[in-house]
Amino acid sequence: MELSKGHRLYLTLIIGITILLGEVIGGLLSNSLALLSDAGHVFTDICALSLSMAASAIANKPVDSRATYGYRRFGLLAALINGILLVAMSVILFIETYKRFAAPPVVNSTMMLYVAAAGLIGNLLMAVVLSQGDKDLNVKSALFHVIGDLLASIGVLISAVVIHFTKFYIADPIAGFIANFLIISSGIKIIKDTVWVFLEFTPTGYNVERISELLREVPEVEGIHDVHVWSISDGVPAFSAHVLVKDRKLSEADEVRKKVEDKLNEMGIKHNVLQFECVDCGNNMLYCKGH
């Protein structure tokens, strides 16, 4: 049976708390920066998952008079905060990594190896759970956290093996540096994607000129202008435009609107506002709204 979004986030949160406790204890006992770095990333995971759970609950609230488009953007807000957390944590750990490069300490590689292996298994379970079912940008941001930790765990495991057999202790901060680079990259991408929606830029994959061209293929449409394409939330594009038709076609506006909406539906745009204007009748206009 497929788990709901809320159950997936909750189960992942429990696994994350378990990994955090294990890596903090293991990192302190083994003196491994790589483990502590990974624990720091897991901590941001827990914050991200908690935030995602709260945001998902709010985002599922029905439309009301205060939020006529609903509360979907709370999920985006959670994703933005998660991205900022990723970048902030990575910057802090970069500073510590630099210090370790200058004077790499002795690390208990055996304990580091066992804890890293357990962390890898835990992160893999978290990634599998979150990757199931539908994923909005909120869940994707949490998944990015987990995938970053999964990659970091692999790096920690490799560095533990290197240290165990070669005593090359600088492998520990090297693994921490690589993990931080991967995490900060994910954080920047999440921030970019969420800010793109908040600024109401044209959604990725949509071209205003191409949409206008396709709508002009409708026989009754003489022209189209004041075209706007934006996102209400992640994966929910919206569209508005002024559509020009011949005077005699104003009486058939509902039929023309249906054809235009069919075109938009084919492009994945289900939220639209269309204003029909007469080409040759001055200010005589008929307003039709789609949804």
Image (cartoon, grey):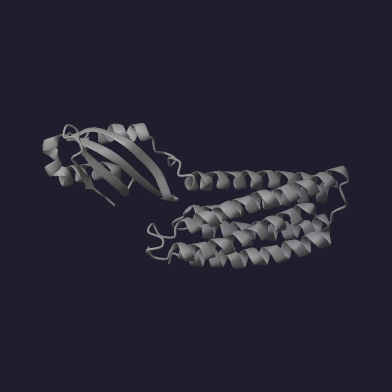
Kindly tell me whether residue 156 is visible in this rendering: yes
Q: Is residue 11 above or below residue 137?
A: below
Among all residues in the image, which is located at the extreme front?
Answer: 283
- Residue 188 falls in which quadrant of the image? top right
Give coordinates of residue 35: x percent, y percent.
75, 55
Q: Is residue 160 left or right of residue 125?
A: right
Q: Nearer the viewer, residue 25 or 288?
A: 288
Quadrant including the N terminus = bottom left
Residue at x 20% of width, y 46% of height: 258
Give the percent coordinates (x, y) of residue 286: 19, 44
- Where residue 149 appears, x then y in whole percent? 65, 53
Q: Left or right of 139: which side holds 211?
A: left
Who is closer to the viewer here, 218 or 244? 244
Query: Residue 57: x percent and y percent?
Result: 48, 66
- For residue 158, say whether it is visible: no
How many labels were placed on the picture?
A: 0
Residue at 38% over, 35% down: 207
Q: Residue at the location (63% across, 43% down)?
A: 185
Residue drawn where x is 34% and y is 32% of the image: 210
Left or right relative to 238: residue 136: right
